[in-house]
Image: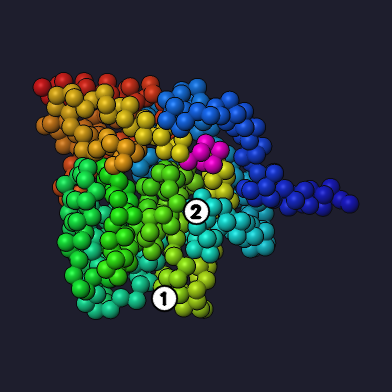
């Protein structure tokens, strides 16, 4: 057998994708995580959240630029090195003979990936479609629902702009009625949130659009309670889970919603440009696919994946991100990131001129927190934090929200948050 032939067989044989014994995660991290988890057996997630030794190993798995303190993980999160390497490896393989490796080899990895995403989401694999981001996932539902002229949709003014514009376009095109309610966050009262939606409902209401974690400042909405209220009135619920999936410890069906869309390149740390759509099994058939399909009224979730040529390497990178996420443990991850948010927020919440725009109560926030300094616009505050302290955040001015959004991740170090705190205190002191 020629050397080239042996190399080819070895290459293809090694393609057990992200979930086999030859996965990049298994080679790079499996044994270290095994020892790490073994040494921490019996400890609660809350205890481990504050253990810097535990998180030091995880921090080293990322390749973030040490010259920039990245606290805008709510925009898009970096991937661990092993995820980046997976994308690079399969991209190089694809380019050896694209139509062969993509369609005949890498395409075979989608079903195992679907199963692992379903396992992570706590649902049936036949309810999971793999796509590119939340906008694509949620637009699939928004444009796919068989709504008629006069049918009513209720969302909020604090929803993500792409979703708001999608519903407005649907209203312009089809004559549906799109209504928005508004909240002054933070709100620490589930009943008040549920009642606000309930009071907006009319006999024409067909669906509620709920943002699980409000992207602007991190407010967690009581989705299950809203869903139960809506279903009691015969109304469906679409959930924007962009900032909750891969962060909060939950199963999608436990939200009691009907549709759920998310990006995987945020807290799951999957490759940039990866997303997921969940549709309750008995809702799939009635939903039109966003892109063409030969069986648009099929009850097969795959009808939402007819994208044509796509990035197969990115899909394999998602698998490695799931491996990394599962090795940490989703409850540990949630508690660590909440700990990091509270670490800096508690240090500045009582400083004169500094205002937090996010509840610090566990049930109402996790990673994201909004902060402002009296007498400064969010834009100027954000610029000062970066120019002087190299702290990268994002400035938010949207409806009744005006703040700088700060979002740590598992790779964030306490000394970096200390720099944020020192910067905020110094800036606020100059405004006294």
Provide residue 210's location: percent of width, then percent of height.
29, 57
- Quick one: label 2, few (<14), some, or many (20+) residues within 10 Å? some
Q: Which residue appears at 38% of the width and 59% of the height?
A: 256
Which SS does the magenta portion mostly show?
helix
* Foreground label between 2 and 1: 2
- Report how many numbered discs are placed on residues in the image: 2
* Quarter occupied by residue 338: top left
**Which is nearer the eye, 342 or 320?**
342
**Measured from the top left, where is residue 393 in percent x and y?**
30, 36
Name the residue carrying label 2. 122
Q: Which residues are magenta?
A: 325-330
Q: Quadrant of the C terminus?
A: top left
Q: Which residue is mark 1?
A: 286
> Is residue 101 left or right of 343 when viewed as pictured?
right
Pick the front one: 86 or 27? 27
Q: Residue at x 45, y 75 (%)?
A: 285
């Amino acid at each position: 057998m020629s050397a080239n032939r042996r190399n080819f067989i070895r290459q293809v044989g090694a393609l057990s994708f992200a979930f086999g014994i030859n996965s990049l995660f298994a080679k790079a991290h499996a044994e270290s995580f095994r020892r790490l988890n073994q040494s921490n057996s019996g400890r609660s997630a809350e205890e481990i959240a504050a253990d810097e030794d535990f998180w030091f190993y995880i921090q080293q798995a990322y390749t973030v630029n040490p010259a920039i303190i990245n606290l805008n993980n709510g925009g898009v999160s970096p991937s661990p090195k092993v995820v980046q390497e997976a994308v690079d490896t399969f991209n190089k393989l694809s380019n050896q003979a694209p139509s062969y490796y993509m369609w005949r080899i890498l395409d075979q990895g989608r079903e195992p990936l679907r199963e692992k995403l379903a396992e992570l989401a706590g649902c049936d694999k036949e309810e999971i479609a793999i796509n590119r981001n939340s906008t694509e996932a949620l637009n699939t539902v928004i444009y796919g629902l068989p709504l008629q002229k006069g049918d009513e949709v209720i969302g909020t003014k604090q929803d993500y702009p792409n979703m708001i514009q999608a519903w407005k376009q649907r209203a312009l095109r089809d004559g549906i009625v799109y209504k928005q309610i508004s909240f002054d966050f933070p709100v620490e009262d589930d009943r008040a949130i549920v009642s606000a939606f309930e009071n907006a409902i009319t006999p024409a209401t067909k669906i509620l659009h709920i943002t699980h974690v409000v992207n602007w400042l991190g407010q967690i909405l009581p989705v299950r309670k809203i869903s139960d209220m809506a279903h009691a009135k015969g109304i469906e619920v679409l959930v924007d889970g962009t900032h909750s999936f891969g962060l909060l410890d939950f199963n999608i069906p436990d939200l009691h919603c009907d549709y759920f869309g998310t990006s995987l390149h945020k807290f799951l740390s999957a490759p940039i440009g990866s997303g997921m759509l969940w549709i309750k099994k008995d809702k799939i058939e009635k939903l039109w696919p966003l892109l063409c399909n030969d069986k648009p009224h099929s009850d097969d979730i795959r009808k939402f994946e007819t994208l044509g040529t796509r990035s197969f390497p990115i899909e394999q990178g998602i698998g490695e991100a799931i491996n990394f996420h599962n090795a940490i443990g989703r409850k540990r991850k949630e508690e660590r990131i909440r700990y990091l948010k509270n670490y800096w927020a508690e240090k500045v919440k009582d400083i004169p001129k500094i205002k937090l725009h996010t509840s610090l109560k566990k049930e109402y926030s996790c990673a994201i927190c909004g902060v402002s300094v009296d007498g400064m616009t969010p834009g100027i505050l954000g610029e000062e934090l970066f120019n002087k302290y190299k702290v990268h955040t994002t400035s938010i001015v949207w409806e009744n929200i005006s703040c700088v959004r700060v979002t740590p991740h598992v790779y964030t170090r306490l000394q970096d948050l200390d720099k944020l705190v020192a910067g905020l205190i110094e800036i606020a002191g100059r405004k006294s």
